């Protein structure tokens, strides 16, 4: 039916966009969906009760192929975006050659095509500043690539809703014939579906995309309430909603809890990071970078960074204790990344973000 529940943040199979095959695509590991339906297995799920009727098995098999086909659809969409950009580059190069007296521009376009074929991405550093036609193609590719995770979420949610409706119809039919075991099994199947983390992430992503753009007023949106992407921590789990993510501890800075706080323990001589897809809908990010109170023997000063669309927006002083406030402009930012850098030993590197909120 749906992918098995993940065990920890950042594990393989988590909903996160990655560069692969030359275009952005969202890896849902949906092949596990069809397998789950056919084997009735799923991490963290209880075995389904025995069913006298074959109806539930029939419904599972009916949807298994559709769920298993989602990865192919995502790959095809990513490849289409990639090929569209390459075709645009080829057409632009040909037009410049016909124009004449444009050899520098021709060489620029050709170099971009070769670079893109190897890298498959367009970071800020390579955006064309002096060739508007090329910059337009680059902007179009970035916008289309950024939309791929949303499209994948729409497919998953739409298919999940159809499966849920079929289960509801089956439950009604089983109620008519008083098949108690069958009804119990269908209810358990519906519960597993509604509790699956990837389905919940997909729904949250769609809700965030539908939310009106915020220009600074109204109630804040806390980062802990948005689906995170590409999580990497050096110890424990990525902590949300005031949880430290390890040792059963909670976030507390200067004796004050942070019910919406985030925790990300960096690795030895490395960085912890998490990304969010904002789709350009928010104006500011505010909160504080801090070291959790119980970190008594921190060995390395930690640096906190906020990055928007690949560009650093804010950097803290190296911290060993206490907190540093921030209020960062996010106008136009589509991809937000929080980073914590540890230059040396990671002992007690209990880095937290205090009440990070969007407006």
Image: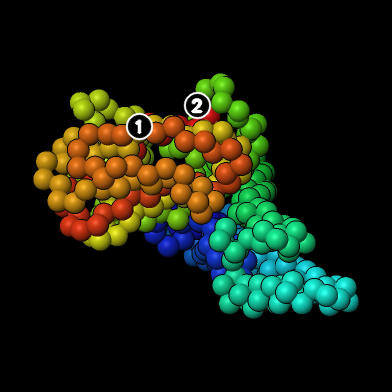
The answer to which of 60 and 327 lies nearer the viewer is 327
Disc 2 to disc 1, C-alpha distance: 17 Å
Tag 2 near tag 1, CB within 8 Å:
no
Query: Which residue, as the protein is rendered here, is positioned at the far right?
Result: 98
> What's the mark number on residue 220?
2
How many numbered badges does the structure rendering display? 2
In the rendered image, residue 327, in percent from the top left (x then y), is placed at 44, 32
Answer left or right for 264 relative to 75.
Answer: left
Is disc 2 placed on a helix, strand or loop?
Answer: loop
At a point 26% along the width and 54% down the height, the residue shown is 342
* Quadrant the N terminus occupies: bottom right
Q: Earlier in the sequence, mark 2 or mark 1?
A: 2
At a point 43% along the width and 37% down the height, the residue shown is 224
Question: Which of the two marks, 2 or 1, is nearer to us in this view?
Answer: 1
In the rendered image, residue 86, in percent from the top left (x then y), is placed at 73, 72
Q: Quadrant of residue 130?
A: bottom right
Q: Looking at the picture, does residue 298 appear above or below residue 330?
A: below
Which color mode does the image show? rainbow
Is disc 1 placed on a helix, strand or loop?
Answer: strand
In the rendered image, residue 176, in percent from the top left (x then y), is placed at 65, 39
For mark 1, does the 10 Å Cα neighbourhood hold few (<14), some (14 to 19), or many (20 or more) residues? few
At a point 66% along the width and 65% down the height, the residue shown is 78
> What's the mark number on residue 217?
none
Q: Quadrant of residue 250?
A: top left
Query: Which residue was labeled with disc 1?
Result: 325
At a point 59% along the width and 64% down the height, the residue shown is 126
Query: Which residue, as the protein is rendered here, is positioned at the far top?
Result: 218
Residue 68 visible somewhere in the drawing: no
The answer to which of 62 and 5 lies nearer the viewer is 5
The answer to which of 74 and 334 lies nearer the viewer is 334
In the rendered image, residue 311, in percent from the top left (x then y), is placed at 50, 51
Residue 132 visible somewhere in the drawing: yes
């Amino acid at each position: 039916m749906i992918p098995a529940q993940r065990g920890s943040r950042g594990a393989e199979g988590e909903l996160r966009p990655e560069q692969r095959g030359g275009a952005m695509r969202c890896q849902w590991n949906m092949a596990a969906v069809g397998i789950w339906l056919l084997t009735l297995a799923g991490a963290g799920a209880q075995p389904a009760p025995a069913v006298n009727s074959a109806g539930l098995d029939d419904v599972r098999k009916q949807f298994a192929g559709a769920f298993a086909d989602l990865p192919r659809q995502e790959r095809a969409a990513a490849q289409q975006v990639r090929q569209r950009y390459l075709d645009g580059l080829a057409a632009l190069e040909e037009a410049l050659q016909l124009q004449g007296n444009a050899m520098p521009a021709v060489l620029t376009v050709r170099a971009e095509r070769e670079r893109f074929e190897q890298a498959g991405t367009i970071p800020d550093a390579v955006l064309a500043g002096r060739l508007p036609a090329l910059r337009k193609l680059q902007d179009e590719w970035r916008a289309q690539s950024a939309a791929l995770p949303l499209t994948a979420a729409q497919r998953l949610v739409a298919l999940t809703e159809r499966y849920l409706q079929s289960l509801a119809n089956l439950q009604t039919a089983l109620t008519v014939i008083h098949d108690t075991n069958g009804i119990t099994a269908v209810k358990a199947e519906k519960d597993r579906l509604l509790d699956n983390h990837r389905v919940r992430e997909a729904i949250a992503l769609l809700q965030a995309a539908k939310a009106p753009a915020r220009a600074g007023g109204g109630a804040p949106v806390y980062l802990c309430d948005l689906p995170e992407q590409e999580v990497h921590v050096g110890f424990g789990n990525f902590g949300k909603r005031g949880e430290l993510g390890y040792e059963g501890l909670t976030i507390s800075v200067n004796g004050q809890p942070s019910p919406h706080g985030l925790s990300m323990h960096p690795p030895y001589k490395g960085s912890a990071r998490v990304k969010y897809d904002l789709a350009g809908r928010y104006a500011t990010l505010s909160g504080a970078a801090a070291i959790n109170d119980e970190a008594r023997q921190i060995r390395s000063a930690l640096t906190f960074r906020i990055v928007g669309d690949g560009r650093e927006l804010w950097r803290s002083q190296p911290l060993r204790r206490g907190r540093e406030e921030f209020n960062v402009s996010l106008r136009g930012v589509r991809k937000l990344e929080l980073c914590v850098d540890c230059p040396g030993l990671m002992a007690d590197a209990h880095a937290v973000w205090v009440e990070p909120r969007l407006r």
